[in-house]
Structures are given as structure tokens and as C-alpha cells.
Image (cartoon, rainbow, N blue to C red):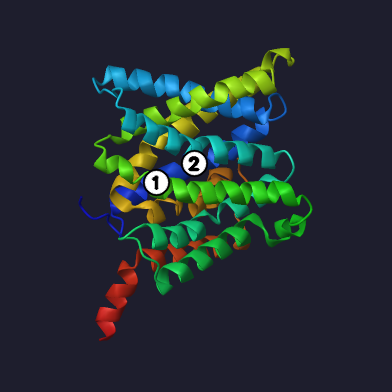
Amino acid sequence: MPAINRSMGLVEWSLLIALSVLWGGSFFFVEVAIDAFGPLTIVAFRVGLAAIVLNLIVIATGARIGLDRRLWLAFLGMGCLNNIVPFTLIVWGQTHIASGLAAILNASTPFFTVVAAHFLTSDEKMTGARLVGVVFGLAGVVYIVGPGTLQGLGANTLAQFAVLGAAMSYAFAGIYGRRFRSLGSSPLVTAAGQVTASALVLLPFALIIEQPWTLPAPGVEVWGAVVGLALLSTALAYVLYFRILATAGATNLLLVTFLIPISATLLGTTILDEPLTSRHLFGIAFIGLGLTVIDGRLMAAFRRAIV
């Protein structure tokens, strides 16, 4: 199996930025939908609609998922780690804590990934530079969202542990997902397979536990948020996710959680005319520094220049 690139190229960085925009929007979509549906129902809609769309695309492109038992067990494992557990924990957590605090806690994903990848992989070992880069990136996220957000830390401890649990699940998912390269599964097929497995597991639980048909009919904006969550933040996002994972590795992939606050800030300033403050700029600079250290190429070039 070819080694995974530790330093990302222009294509990987572009895809990572695009993924950060798609996943950043999920926090907004959840905030809109959470008043109309329960957490399990939202997640079931999210993966169910995404599964329908992705399977249609698989058929339209002439690809084939197949019925290989080993592949579908891998889809189920990936679905649990990457969808069922983290999606449900984050949605439930957002019913008790502010989305800004949830974003900060979710940004701990690269830290968990660096540690887990060190012990569970042979080609993504932890280095001092990578760990320092993660710390810089996390500090930048805190600074962008606003240090005052941390004042709520501890107020709803269980919800905060839920979001941290989601971050840990994402970390293990990134490492677990590496196996799809050896299984010969393309990014599109892998994305379709894992959300299909997730939908098959989640739908019965949502129907039995939350009985969504008993709730008042939601408005157009709620359905728009659900569709956006499914098609943009899940279906399209996972095609990019598995494409990056296949070439750049788990640690690089999950740096996306640092980029999400930047995407949200820039979208707010360009589309909603929100002010771009010095706090935002300093936070972006911290994140940029952290990503540069983790990437390693600029530091290596600097060392070669001074030797």
C-alpha cells in the first residue's frame, strides 16, 4: 500500500477548505432544525437523505457497491464512528450548550487524532512539531469564537463531555477509514456505503424513541435546514472527506475542525456583513501558524536555509 502524504498539496488544501465550509454549515442547520425535531430524528434525516442521493449518484456513474460482507462490516464500523455516535452526541449537546462552545470542544479532534494515530498507525507518528501545531490551532479556535465562551465551561458538563466524545469518535473514524484503500473502495462508494449503514441502524431508533410523526408539522425553513444538512454537510462533504483521507491521512484530514471557525467567520463577513474584528484576525493567524507547523514543509525549508 502506498504511503499517505504527510504534507498536503494544493488540491488537498483546497478540498480541506471546501470541507470546512460544508461542515461549518452543519452547526447552523442543526440550530434551525433542533426546535422542530429530536436529535435522533435529525441525524436519521441527515444520513437517510444523504444515503439516497449518494446511492443514486453511484448508480448514475456506473459504480457498484456490491454485497461483500467484509466491506459492509467496514461500512457499519465507519458509520458508527463517523456518523451515528458523533452526530447524535453533537446534536444533543447543542440542545444544552452554545454552538460556539460546541465548536471549540469539537476542535479538539486533531489533538485526539494525533495521539490515536501515533499508537494505531505506522506512518502518522506524533512529533513535537505536530503537537505544538495542534495547540496553536486550538488556541486560535478559542480566540476566534471568543474566550468569553469558555465561561460556560462546566455549566452543562454532560453536554460538553458529549461533544468531546464526538471529537474522539471522529478521531478514531479517521484512522479506521484508512482501511478502505486496501478494500479497493472509492471515495464515492465509501461515502454512500457508510451513510447507508448508518441510516439502516438509526431509522428504527428514531421512529421508536422519538416518534417524529407525532410532532407539529415543521416550517419550510426547518425542511430547508434538514435538506442542507443532508445534501451539503453530509453527502457532498463525505465525498471530499474520503478523497482527502485516501491521500493525506487522518491527522491532516481532521485539521478541518480548525478551519471551520475561519469559514464561519469569513462567510459571516462576506454574506451577512458581520464585522471582521482584530480578534478574528489574530485567531486566524494562530490557526494558520498551527497548520503551517503541522504541515512541516515551510519549517523544513527554513531549517535548510539556515544550515
In depth, the one of 119 and 107 nearer the eye is 119
> Which residue: 30% across, 80% down?
303
In depth, the one of 302 and 60 nearer the eye is 60
Q: Quadrant of residue 220?
A: top right
Q: Position of residue 113 (x, y in %)?
A: 46, 56
Q: Is residue 37 left or right of residue 129?
A: right
In depth, the one of 26 and 201 nearer the eye is 201
Mark sitting on residue 137: none
| Tag 2 residue | 81
> Which residue: 49% across, 34% down?
233
| Tag 1 residue | 176
Q: Amino acid at mark 1?
A: Tyr
> Which residue: 65% across, 28% down?
33
Q: Position of residue 43 (x, y in %)?
A: 58, 29
Label 2 crowd (10 A; few <14 / some 14-19 / many >=20):
many
Whether pointer 1 and pointer 2 mark residues with C-beta atoms closer than 8 Å, the reply is yes
Q: Secondary structure at mark 2?
A: helix
Can residue 271 be seen at all in this image of the molecule? no
Label 1 crowd (10 A; few <14 / some 14-19 / many >=20):
some
Instruction: Check the image and name the residue furthest to the bottom.
Output: 307
Q: Position of residue 292 (x, y in %)?
A: 40, 65
Q: CA distance from mark 1 to mark 2?
A: 8 Å
Q: Amino acid at mark 2?
A: Leu
Q: Quadrant of residue 294?
A: bottom left
Can residue 106 be seen at all in this image of the molecule? yes
Could you tell me which quadrant the C terminus lies in? bottom left
**How many numbered dots are placed on residues in this image?**
2
In depth, the one of 19 and 58 nearer the eye is 58
Instruction: Check the image and name the residue furthest to the left.
Output: 2
Q: Position of residue 266 (x, y in %)?
A: 53, 48
